[in-house]
Image: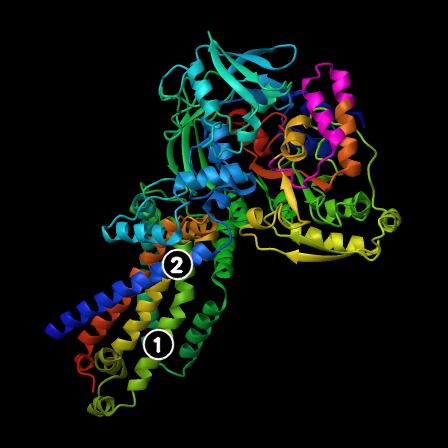
Amino acid sequence: MTTHDEMARLPAMGRIGRRDLIKGAAVLGAVGAAERMLGRPAQAAAPKKGGALKIAIGAGSTSDTFDPATFTDSYMQFVGFGCMRNCLTEIDNAGKLIGELAESWTASPDAKVWSFKIRKGVTFHDGKALTTEDVIDSINHHRGDDSKSPAKPLLAPITSLKSDGDAVVITLEAGNADLPYLLSDYHIAIMPSTGDGKVDWQSGNGTGGYAVKKFEPGVRAYLERNPNYWKTGRAHFDSIEVLSIIDVAARTNALTTGEIHLMDRCDLKTVHLLKRTKKVNIYEVTGSQHYTFPMITTQAPFDNNDVRLALKFAVNREEMVQKILRGYGKVGNDTPIAPSTSFYAELEQRTYDPDKAKFHLKKAGAEGLTLDLSAADAAFAGAVDAAVLYKEHAAKAGITINVIREPNDGYWSNVWMKKPWGACYWGGRPTADWMFSTAYEAGAAWNDTFWDNAKFNQLLTAARVELDEAKRAEMYKEMQTLVRDDGGVVVPMFANYVGAASDELAHDKMAGNWDLDGMKASERWWFA
Amino acid sequence: MGPILKMVAQRLALGLLTLFVVSLIIFLSVEMLPGDITEAILGQGATPETVAAFRRELGLDVPAHLRYLAWLGDIAQGDLGRSLASKRDIAELIGVRLNNTLFLAGLAAAIAVPLAVTLGLLAALYRNSWFDRGINLVTLSSISFPEFFIAYALIFLFAVTWDWFPSIVNVTPDTPFWERVYRCILPAVTLTLVTTAHMMRMTRAAIINLMASPYIEMARLKGLSSSRIIVRHALPNALSPIINVIAINLAYLVVGVVLVEVVFVYPGLGQLMIDSVSKRDIPVVQAACLIFAVTYILLNLLADILSILSNPRLLHPR
């Protein structure tokens, strides 16, 4: 037992890669000698330089550009954020916030005025030195009336951006203790300024570990290692070729035939077969990605909290995880905050209880309720199946659900936030405040439940400037309870990131903030 | 040659009219799809504010008919315009993809056309024999399966099990010719399997049809061998329908292979067009459609000219 526990703990300590763990487990099973594996991780964990990595990502489109304000899927996230550029801050593989292009930062006591000290000696791929002007223009790229950036709402509270020696001073209209976290967002990449308040995003010039040499949107990107990369012990590959392979069967074939070394998003229906393939390791990371069924709480019958509670009790979350995610996930508790997120509070798990659902339905005077549930696989893989499963669960509680299959095409513009009840997914955010202010605060652009809870909104603003960690944790706990018991969202499950890699690749513990080791497999992984 | 030139001129003029109608239909149907490029690109990130800013930037706040006329004016001067989504020059964007598509179509045709015509001739020569039935059975079975099924079957055998050919076609404009041929073999064979039956059957039918003619009877009475009768006497007169079927199949190889492109991750025009439709990138969709329409028009024209050359009677319809 102890050896098993030790093996589980070692990756967490960063002493040993998951690959070694899997190998070690095989040795352990065959020989039963734990010492053999415990004796050797030191040299296995030392990254080696070199090699040409080929990776296939199940996203990407001909319409992709280098403009981070247009990044929407994991393809450009990996190329832009993972390879080409850096942000001011970074979330490391343990989920901790560390400085990236910002060496350090300080805040005023009310968390309104922030000063980020910019790292010295950093150069762009073309040799230009990083300046505060680059940082300011890169942030301004997402602000202003003409911005179409998804990061616009994140940066809206900024009232002024100034350069102060080697620091950038950011002033907010209201305090926000999480600002450094926000600046790790993949949109807010630092690009070279053109000198007239704009940035040069067109060339792809950045400070990242790899410089882009060739780019065919929707097909491939070819990048070579930046010889002057400022980070030590990162970016080990000589070159990286990033292919866009949307078809999951083609992606899997490419991996099993050795055309690529790494792929994201395995087909969960066949991953058990892929596991049997030699030289392929499956990785699985629990992150903050979650699947939801948001109800528009301003419309009947969802304006009645008893109806919302009835629906929350009328879903069997365990079965969803088993059937839809094939076990590659974790049950949700009707809040969007994942265990890996800051200020996650362990609340009592809500379970499937048709009787309680009936009770709330009766209280709402809505017995024999019939509802439409809109779903399409654009919302998340398996959304239509999940909706059908929900229908079966709810039938036992006396609720009739008509599953409406919507077209994938145009789902986000025509169904999401338009139809009263539908399916949706969220990549999750690294902090509770970020997640809440993105999709739960009254008036937020993506508040897909149109939920407006005065107590919640007031707590959210107060918690942002509360610097006492214990008090802050208490406030976030209360907010999570409010979302769970009053909010308009059913969160049946958190989905793991499941991908596959050739056994030639090695890495440390993987980050959970995004897929592919926080999208930084490019600079955190190496060829063993 | 006079009448032929006249016909070519007429057909080209009609072709231009067809192109105009095609472009109008495409423009209207993409306009009618729900959502526009701004919502498609911003996806979940679309807020009324960002959508409005994006539309202003792309000039989508201009009414549709004005946008169409502006596009038509540019195209008349040979300017395909720029992609709305990536701002890249469409001619450049499409150039690489079109090359890839033509290469694959050319490779598949180079295998399929001689194969189909030869098999068709042999089938006619040995008609109703076991050979004829066998060829029919094989080619008809392969055309009956969806092409992605054939593609996956080939991948399973030749890429996964035996590891002879790559499972995905990873080619760049700098890939050397023979390397490119090697990498494209599996998709080319897939396309060969799905097109051969059609051309083979037409060759066989056209020739058998002629075998009852008096002049064939005459040739037989002269004591010619059946292979000589078929190749020298029947085939030249059967060319016209065969050429037409080949033209249709060539056009299919250019415009209809998107499933094969997806399975083999082949960066062709079909994939570009799907991407552009789902992103509502109208100028790119228009340009790709025009290329497809031009392919059909030109191949049909070519087939007609060749038919006439092979059978001058067609110039003087009774």
Comparing labels 2 and 1, the label whose residue is closer to the camera: 2
Q: Position of residue B283 (x, y in %)?
A: 36, 49
Give the farthest residue toward the left: B2
Q: Residue at x 49, y 12 (%)?
A: A119
Q: Position of residue B91 (x, y in %)?
A: 30, 46
Residue at mark 1: B202
Q: Can you say whether B81 is above or below A441 in the image?
A: below
Q: CA–CA distance between discs 2 and 1?
A: 33 Å
Q: Position of residue A428 (x, y in %)?
A: 64, 33
User: Does label 2 or label 1 sit earlier along the sequence?
Assistant: 2
Label 2 CA crowd tier, 10 Å (few <14, some 14–19, many 20+): some
**Whether residue A261 is visible:** no
Magenta-drawn segment: A445-474
Q: Is residue A447 magenta?
A: yes
Give the quadrant of the N terminus of chain A. top right
Q: How is the image coloured?
A: rainbow
> Is A514 on the left-hand or right-hand side of A71?
right
* Disc 2 secondary structure class: helix
Q: Amino acid type of disc 2?
A: Ile
Give the quadrant of the C terminus of chain A. top right
Q: Can you say whether A179 is above or below A384 in the image?
A: above
